[in-house]
Amino acid sequence: MRTIVTAALCASILAGCASSPDEISAAYVSPVQYSGYECDQIRAELVRVSSRVREVAGAQQKQADNDAIAMGVALVVFWPALFFIGGNDRKEELSRLKGEYDALEQAAIQKNCPVASELKAGRGG
């Protein structure tokens, strides 16, 4: 019985840990909302969104690192450290921003904007 309780506690704690930004997939955002944008507006919005993605991804990575440290300390030394896990997970925001970026990229491709070719070249494709 004690093993089951311990396993359940560990599983619930691990579920509360922040994910690494690389593990967070993009939420679907329709490119239709950008259909009225001109190429210059799409470029400006891509710059704004990519900047915000970097900012939020950095905060998410910091939280994931802090959670991993707290988990290690809690498991090895001091169980009350488990209370410091989680708290500032930005998973939903990062997922939405990645989706916006993808939608903007699709809009740029559909409108044949120069930024679409730049993005493709930047990926090596």
Image (spheres, rainbow, N blue to C red):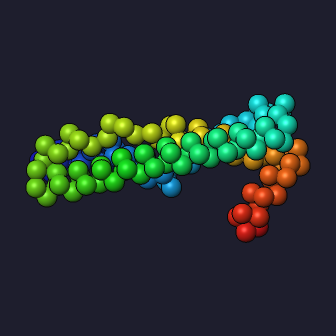
Identify the image quadrant of the C terminus: bottom right
Q: Which image quadrant for residue 44? A: top right
In the displayed structure, does residue 62 sit left or right of residue 48? Answer: left
Which residue is found at the position 36% from the left and 47% from the top?
63
- Given residues 37 and 22, the one toward you in this image is 37
- Given residues 10 and 22, the one toward you in this image is 22
In the displayed structure, does residue 99 sit left or right of residue 21? Answer: right
Image: 27 above or below 75: above
Total labels drawn: 0
In the displayed structure, does residue 115 sit left or right of residue 26? Answer: right
- Residue 106 shows in the view: yes
Q: Which image quadrant for residue 84? A: top left
Which residue is found at the position 88% from the left and 44% from the top?
111
Which residue is found at the position 84% from the left and 30% from the top?
36
- Given residues 21 and 122, the one toward you in this image is 122
Which residue is found at the position 17% from the left and 45% from the top?
81
Residue 74, position as x, y percentages in the image: 16, 51
Residue 17, position as x, y percentages in the image: 33, 46
Residue 124, position as x, y percentages in the image: 73, 69
- Residue 8 shows in the view: no
Pick out the residue farthest to the bottom. 124
Pick out the residue farthest to the right. 112
- Given residues 37 and 103, the one toward you in this image is 37
Residue 35, position as x, y percentages in the image: 83, 34
